[in-house]
Image (tube, grey):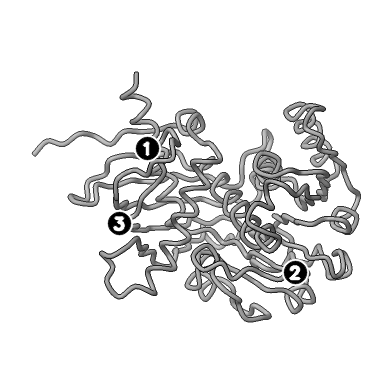
Amino acid sequence: MSSKPPVYYNADAVRRFLTWPLVNNAVETALTAVVKQHRCQELSAQSFAIQPKRSFTACGDHSGKVLLTMPAFVGNYRLASPDFSGELANHRSTLACKLVTSFRDNPERIPPLPSIHAHVLLFDNQTGQLTAIMEGTDLTTWRTASASVVATKQLYFRRFGVQAEMEMPINVAIVGCGVQGQIHAAAFCANFRVRKLNLYNRTEAKAQELSDQLQRELGTESGTQILVCRSANEACQDADVICIATYSKEPLINIKDLKSNQGVHINAVGAGVVHFSEVSSDIYHQAKVYVDCYANAEAELKGFPVPITAELGAILLEGNYPNKADISVFQSMGMASEDACVAQAVHDAILSSAGDS
């Protein structure tokens, strides 16, 4: 029996079709599908996601070298049309698996390499045949930053009103200027009105490099003031929104670093041995904490100091926003269903582009 070989999309092919509207829409779709999965009795009635706990395979006995396997099935969902005309594409289902290697020391190599490498496999959900292999490193960085964008919109801006993200300028702190810090800085400048962007990195030169890059890309007309800070405290003290993405084993931000009684949102994207080690427990004890998926939190946030308030998808569906003066934390871990929906959206956009030509 003959079958078509799977198509391969390299990094350049994927990168050409990654846009914030495409990725944000796919990530929101995945977040709500996960919530509907455990609320709906009849799965065929609406979108749903099935995603087993991700598996971790250590590379020998080296804890800094890991292979992750992240399968997911997202059923009966709709994405925005590839041209974002306002129409929704037909209902679809996606079977996918992302394979990720996380080698923590890669950035220290000469020449440096990303610490994360990923590929997403897309399957025909009727036959199980492999239909596409997609380079997933950029997809992973974009969907992680997109989840922070969605969380900030829902957990920070919505507390001030429906159109707040279009009207309110904000101060943003980026703590950790590695790959995730860089994409978060770009994402927030692209999606929100950033009045001031504070950058902190353990190695100041990396923060300065990011500052220079953003100054070139944004230009003076953006109106965004970009500052390189010498400490996390300095970066965070006037921040409305904080994005922290490091491997730190010790807290880098504490409650004394935050604005008091004015409302602050934190996107915690740490990938250390303990996911939540970069944020101090005194912040968690005064915050409302949200996650992408309860199952992920149960498996990967062992010893987490406080109860989880809600899944982010539930906020998207129900609108139970924090109060104006609250500290909110989005404890981001990433989900296979996000990878599946973003990969499907990219695949659709590529096919649509080929059809137009």
In the image, residue 248 lies at what x, y percent? 74, 61
**Crowd rating for badge 2 (residues with CA inside 10 Å; few <14, some 14–19, many 20+):** many
Q: Residue at x 81, y 48 (%)?
A: 201
Q: Is residue 176 left or right of residue 272?
A: right
The residue identified by callout 2 is: 327
Quarter containing the C terminus: top left
Disc sitting over residue 347 in the figure: 1
Question: Whole-Å distance between the Cαs marked 3 and 2?
Answer: 35 Å
Is label 3 in a helix, a strand or a loop?
strand
Left or right: residue 291 compared with residue 122: right
Disc 1 residue type? His
Query: Regarding mark 2 in the picture, which secondary structure is present there?
Result: strand
Q: Which residue is mark 3?
A: 76
Q: Nearer the viewer, mark 1 or mark 3?
A: 3
Q: Which of label 2 and label 1 is nearer to you? A: 2
Left or right of 295 on screen, residue 272: right
Q: Residues within 10 Å of mark 3 (few under 14, many from 20)?
A: some
Name the residue rendered at 31%, 53% in the picture: 95
- Pointer 2 with pointer 1, Cβ within 8 A: no
